[in-house]
Image: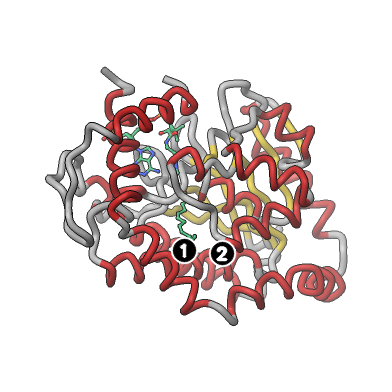
């Protein structure tokens, strides 16, 4: 079922769903254990000769951004950032057909306000660290990348996507009945401009690779089996620029957007917690999760 169709079902389902109280979890129908595995969710390969690291996201089934995933991601990123020998980072997925499914919906459903706050802080941390990274960052998008997955790709300096028409990318939050936060919106507007962002966010547009290239959401399309070699080639070009000049330029372009979140972090967490724990939003998330489950049957 397409997400558009799924949304229509979500809307029609929502009237049938039972009500439950604020902050109180309805009966759990979904496996909440999936992301609790202790196996590493991120694998980093660093080549000291080239100064380039490749970060493989390997959190089955769909690299959803859970609190554990985000914590591991940030620790990995921090280690690379502190290593003066590491100048470039390529982020890709080891999961078939998916770059990242975005924020883990199970982290936003039926959780206490405290836990939601902790989760949101980790999402902010991932964005702040990656958007503000001194390294050259390239997203090698070898699968679908909705919502938070798209944000992660947009946060890099350059995006290469596998030219596979069934893959989609975009900030589709409104399809779930939720609102992309201002810094998601800012990151997209900084990449594709105000008008495209305004329309894409309101309609929750998910673009196929050619559409994404057309609007500038990605910079290059390549056959899927060439994605890492294309990322390495692009990295070589970027590595030829003196680091200090490139880093100052990057910071000049991104600092106002970063400062906007940094100076509103607590309020942004509170906004998220108030919003996501609303009965109506919990109801939409529940219906959406049920649709994702039913897709298979
Ligand atoms: C006023 C405003 C104030 C403040 C701001 C407030 C709020 C902002 C809040 C939130 C912002 C959120 C951004 C997000 O990222 S929300 C997440 C959006 N993600 C999606 O919509 C993606 C949904 N998934 C898919 O579309 C597909 O799964 C796929 C295209 C990624 C992959 O398709 P496949 O066919 O390969 O795989 P599936 O069978 O669909 O899924 C396998 C498995 O994974 C589960 N799953 C999928 N996505 C998620 C997810 N994001 N989180 C958790 N779990 C997910 C799916 O249910 C299946 O589970 P089972 O194997 O059946 O157990």
Spatial CA distance of label 2 from label 1 is 6 Å
User: Is label 1 within 8 A of ligand 1 (CB to nearest ligand atom)?
Assistant: yes
Quick one: SS at disc 2? helix
The residue where tag 2 is placed is 127
Residue 122 can be seen, yes or no: no
Disc sitting over residue 123 in the figure: 1
Local secondary structure at mark 1: helix
Q: Which residue is drawn at 79% across and 50% down?
A: 193
| Quadrant of the image containing the N terminus | top left
Horizontal and vertical percent position of residue 245:
87, 73
Q: Residue at x 62, y 21 (%)?
A: 165
Q: In this view, does 16 lie above or below 177?
A: above
Residue furthest to the bottom = 263
Please give the name of the residue rendered at 48% of the width and 67% of the height, measured from the top-left corner.
74
> Which image quadrant for residue 155?
bottom right
Dot 1 crowding, Cα within 10 Å, few <14, some 14–19, many 20+: many
Q: Which residue is nearer to you in this view: 261 or 58?
A: 261
In the rendered image, is residue 98 in sight?
A: yes
């Amino acid at each position: 079922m397409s997400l558009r169709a799924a949304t229509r079902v979500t809307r029609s389902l929502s009237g049938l769903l039972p009500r439950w109280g604020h902050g109180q979890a309805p009966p759990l129908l979904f496996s909440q254990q999936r992301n609790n595995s202790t196996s590493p969710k991120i694998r980093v390969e660093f080549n000291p000769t080239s100064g380039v690291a490749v970060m493989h996201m390997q959190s089955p089934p769909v690299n959803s951004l859970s609190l554990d995933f985000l914590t591991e991601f940030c620790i990995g990123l921090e280690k690379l950032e502190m290593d003066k020998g590491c100048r470039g980072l390529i982020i890709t997925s080891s999961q078939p057909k998916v770059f990242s499914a975005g924020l883990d919906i199970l982290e936003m459903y039926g959780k206490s306000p405290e836990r939601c706050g902790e989760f949101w802080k980790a999402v902010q941390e991932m964005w702040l660290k990656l958007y503000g990274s001194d390294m050259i960052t390239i997203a090698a998008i070898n699968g679908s990348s909705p919502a938070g997955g798209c944000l992660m790709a947009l946060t890099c300096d350059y995006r290469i996507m596998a030219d596979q028409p069934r893959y989609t990318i975009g900030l589709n939050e409104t399809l779930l009945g939720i609102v992309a936060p201002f810094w998601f919106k800012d990151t997209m507007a900084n990449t594709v401009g105000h008008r495209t962002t305004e329309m894409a966010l309101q309609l929750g547009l998910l673009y196929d690779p050619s559409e994404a290239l057309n609007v500038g959401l990605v910079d290059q399309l390549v056959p899927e089996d060439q994605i890492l070699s294309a990322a390495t080639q692009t990295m070589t070009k970027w590595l030829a620029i003196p680091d200090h000049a490139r880093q100052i330029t990057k910071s000049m372009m991104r600092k106002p957007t970063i400062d906007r979140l940094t100076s509103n972090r607590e309020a942004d967490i509170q906004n998220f917690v108030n919003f996501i724990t609303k009965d109506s939003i919990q109801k939409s998330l529940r219906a959406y999760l049920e649709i994702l489950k039913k897709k298979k049957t």
